[in-house]
C-alpha cells in the first residue's frame, strides 16, 4: 500500500480530503498539521495521530499540499527537498504551479487537481440533511493537470483525485494554464463579482420595500430558468420583454471592452501572482 501524506490536513479543504483518505483505506495515509485548532478538527473526524513532516515526507509516495496558496512557495522549499525520488507532489489549486513558485526536481512528479463542486441544480443532501454544496455526497467533476514529470504520474494523480473528491463524475484533463483560466480567471474574477453584485441588488430592492422572502424566491426560481435558457439546457428562449430588458441593462452595467479586459492572460497571470504573493518577489 502506497504512502500518502497530507500537509495542512486540518484546514477546510484538508479536513475533507483527509477524511476521504481515512475512510477509503486505499492508501497508507498520514496527516501533518501544526495549528492547534486544526488538530482539534482532525480529532473530531477520528484522526488522532499527527505526523511530523520532516519524518514522514521522506517515506511518502505522494505528498498532498492542502495549504494556502500564499504559503506554498515558502513551505514547498522545505517540503520538496525531503521527498524521495519517484514520489509525487499534489496541489489542490493551480495558482502555485501557474506562478512557478515551487522548486522543480526532475526525479519527482507534480500533479494539480481542483474540484468543480456539485452543479448548481444539484439536490443531493449530506448526512445532516443539508444540500451538498462542496461535494462529498453529491457527484462532482474535477480538473486535473500534470505539471511536471512522466506520464504515469497523471494516472496515479487522477486515481487519488477520485478518492479525495469522491464521488467524481468526469475528470477533465487540462493544462495548468487552462486551470488557471478556470480559477481564478472565470470563477473568482468574473462569476464571483457578478454573484456579489446580484446580492447587492437584491438587498437594495429589499431596502425599497420588497419582502425579502418573496424577492429571494422570485430570484432563485428565475435564476434557474435563466441559466437553463442561456446555457442551452432546455429548448426555450427569453420573452421579447426579457430580451429588451437584458439588452438595455447590458450596456448600462458593463463597459464595452469588459471581455477583452477580463478574459485576458495578462490579467489572469497578475491575479495569480498576487494570490501566491510572488508578485512581491519579482
Image (cartoon, helix red, strand yellow):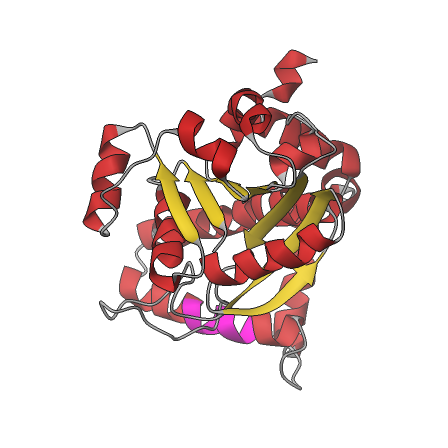
Name the residue at 57% across, 21% down. 77
Name the residue at 64% across, 27% down. 102
Residue nearest the observer in this picture, 166 or 6: 6
Tell me if residue 98 is in the magenta stretch: no
Query: Residue 35's spot in the image, x, y percent?
Result: 29, 28
Residue 165's place in the image compared with 13, above or below, is: below
Residue nearest the observer in this picture, 229 or 164: 164
Q: Which residues are magenta?
A: 220-226
**Which residue occupies the extreme bottom position in the image?**
235
Left/right placement of residue 213 relative to residue 247 reads left
Tell me if residue 223 is in the magenta stretch: yes
Residue nearest the observer in this picture, 255 or 7: 7
**Quarter of image, res 212:** bottom left
Query: Residue 112's spot in the image, x, y percent?
Result: 62, 46
Q: Main secondary structure of the magenta part?
A: helix
Name the residue at 75% across, 49% down. 175
Amino acid at each position: 500500500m502506497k504512502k500518502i501524506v497530507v500537509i495542512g490536513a486540518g484546514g477546510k479543504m484538508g479536513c475533507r480530503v483527509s477524511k476521504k483518505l481515512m475512510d477509503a483505506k486505499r492508501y497508507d495515509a498520514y496527516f501533518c498539521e501544526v495549528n492547534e485548532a486544526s488538530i482539534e478538527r482532525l480529532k473530531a473526524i477520528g484522526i488522532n495521530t499527527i505526523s511530523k513532516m520532516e519524518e514522514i515526507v521522506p517515506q511518502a509516495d505522494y505528498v498532498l499540499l492542502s495549504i494556502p496558496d500564499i504559503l506554498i512557495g515558502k513551505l514547498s522549499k522545505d517540503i520538496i527537498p525531503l521527498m524521495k525520488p519517484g514520489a509525487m507532489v499534489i496541489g489542490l489549486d493551480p495558482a502555485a504551479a501557474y506562478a512557478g513558485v515551487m522548486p522543480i526536481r526532475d526525479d519527482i512528479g507534480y500533479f494539480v487537481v481542483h474540484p468543480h463542486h456539485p452543479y448548481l441544480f444539484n439536490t443531493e443532501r449530506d448526512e445532516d440533511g443539508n444540500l451538498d454544496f462542496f461535494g462529498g455526497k453529491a457527484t462532482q467533476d474535477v480538473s486535473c493537470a500534470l505539471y511536471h514529470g512522466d506520464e504515469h504520474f497523471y494516472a496515479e494523480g487522477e486515481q487519488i483525485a477520485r478518492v479525495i473528491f469522491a464521488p467524481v463524475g468526469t475528470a477533465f484533463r487540462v493544462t495548468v494554464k487552462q486551470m488557471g483560466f478556470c480559477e481564478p480567471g472565470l470563477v473568482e474574477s468574473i462569476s464571483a463579482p457578478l454573484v456579489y453584485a446580484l446580492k447587492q441588488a437584491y438587498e437594495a430592492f429589499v431596502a425599497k420595500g420588497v419582502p425579502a422572502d418573496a424577492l429571494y424566491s422570485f430570484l432563485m426560481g428565475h435564476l434557474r430558468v435563466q441559466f437553463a435558457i442561456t446555457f442551452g439546457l432546455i429548448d426555450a428562449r427569453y420573452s421579447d420583454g426579457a430580451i429588451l430588458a437584458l439588452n438595455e441593462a447590458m450596456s448600462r452595467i458593463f463597459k464595452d471592452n469588459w471581455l477583452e479586459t477580463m478574459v485576458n492572460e495578462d490579467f489572469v497571470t497578475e491575479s495569480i501572482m498576487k494570490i501566491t504573493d510572488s508578485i512581491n518577489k519579482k
